[in-house]
Amino acid sequence: MRRVQLIILVGMCLGLAGCFERIVEPADVFGDIQQGETYSPASKMIDEWYAVEAIDPQTFAINEPKSSQYNTSYLIVGDTRALMFDAGSGERPAGSRSMREVAARYAGQKPITLILSHFHYDHIADAAIFDGVTLLDRPDIRAHITDQVFTITPWESLDMAWRSLNVTALISDGEMIDLGGRRLTVFNLPGHTTEAVVLFDRDRNQVFAGDFVYRHLGGIIAFAPGSDLVAYKANSTRLLQLINIDTQFFGAHGIPQFGREWLMLLDRELDTMVTGHATYRYVANYLAPGLPWRVQQDGDLSIYTTPLVDPSFFWSLWTLLVVATVSLLAVYLLYRIACLSLPSGGNRK
């Protein structure tokens, strides 16, 4: 019996060692993008934190080049009102202007509608400062609105805070927002998260993509609660079918502007992942160091996902039960080994 227990323990240790031998810590996940850079010489610095770049006279990229996630939010202005897409990283220095104040500077006297690309902490920091937020009309969101207040949980935001937001409106997938002389179509494209929003200005051929797709050498994140590789692939294909060859994309991290080719690359690599043809490596990611995430790479594109199994299963109750069972087994084996290492009491006279 003792020999069997020792064999099991040695096998478990060798298995873990074999996994962690493959872990590679990226030397510089951001490549040539250095913290503090502005993305255009034409950018206007505000409070030594925001770098505001005019994409056109009615569209503004509000970069936070000194933030840890290299965030970019977007102010989209029409003739009668403006739309703010995301609300800041939450890392601005004390005393600096809020995202709401910066947006008002460029929106003039027009009312501002806030839409969040998703609920992660680095996109929602100043959301409560706005007059309210327009959310997707999804059953899971509608079910958690009480007295026109929606609360983002730590599970959704990936930090420790509960954030309550006043809900001014709900909008459905495929519905259009009219800003006066400028219309945007709202798409719910799950993949990065279930509530992921992408905005499409067909007339100007501009897509505001949030975290669904961005040009960032740190990599695409598909390992969070709510990430779904199958949905990600289906919706990357859907987005490709909605746009044309000249569509310009504006992402929420890294280099703000990129073309259709980057989405095509993402779609192709997601296809290899969901069809079982991916060649994964196990690596560390700067957002969750110390854990062996799988990564699929093609040139500058890296897609990070959960270890061993897809995220929809990894974050499920079944995985929790497996982890609990393995943990209990490990504790039991350690207990048995400790007992074996103790000298036998024997019979004493």
Image (cartoon, rainbow, N blue to C red):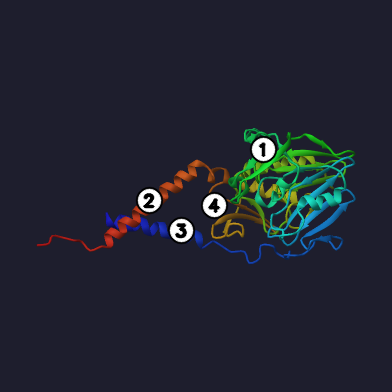
Residue positioned 77% across, 34% down in the render = 175
Please give left or right for residue 31 compared with residue 335 in the image.
right
Query: In the rendered structure, are the residues bearing label 2 and label 1 in contact, judged by CB atoms less than 8 Å apart?
Result: no
Residue labelled with disc 2: 329
- Name the residue tied to disc 3: 16
Residue 245 shows up from this direction: no
Q: Report x, y in % for residue 16.
A: 46, 58
SS of the residue at dot 2? helix
* Nearer mark to the viewer, of 3 and 2: 2
Q: How far apart are marks 2 and 4 (CA)?
A: 20 Å
Dots 3 and 4: beta carbons under 8 Å? no
Residue 149: mark in rendering: 1
Which picture quadrant has residue 344?
bottom left
Instruction: Please name which of the two marks, 1 or 3, marks the residue nearer to the observer.
Output: 1
Relative height, residue 240 to residue 341 (above, below): above
Circle 4 or circle 1, nearest the eye: 1
Instruction: For marks 2 and 1, give the CA distance.
Output: 44 Å
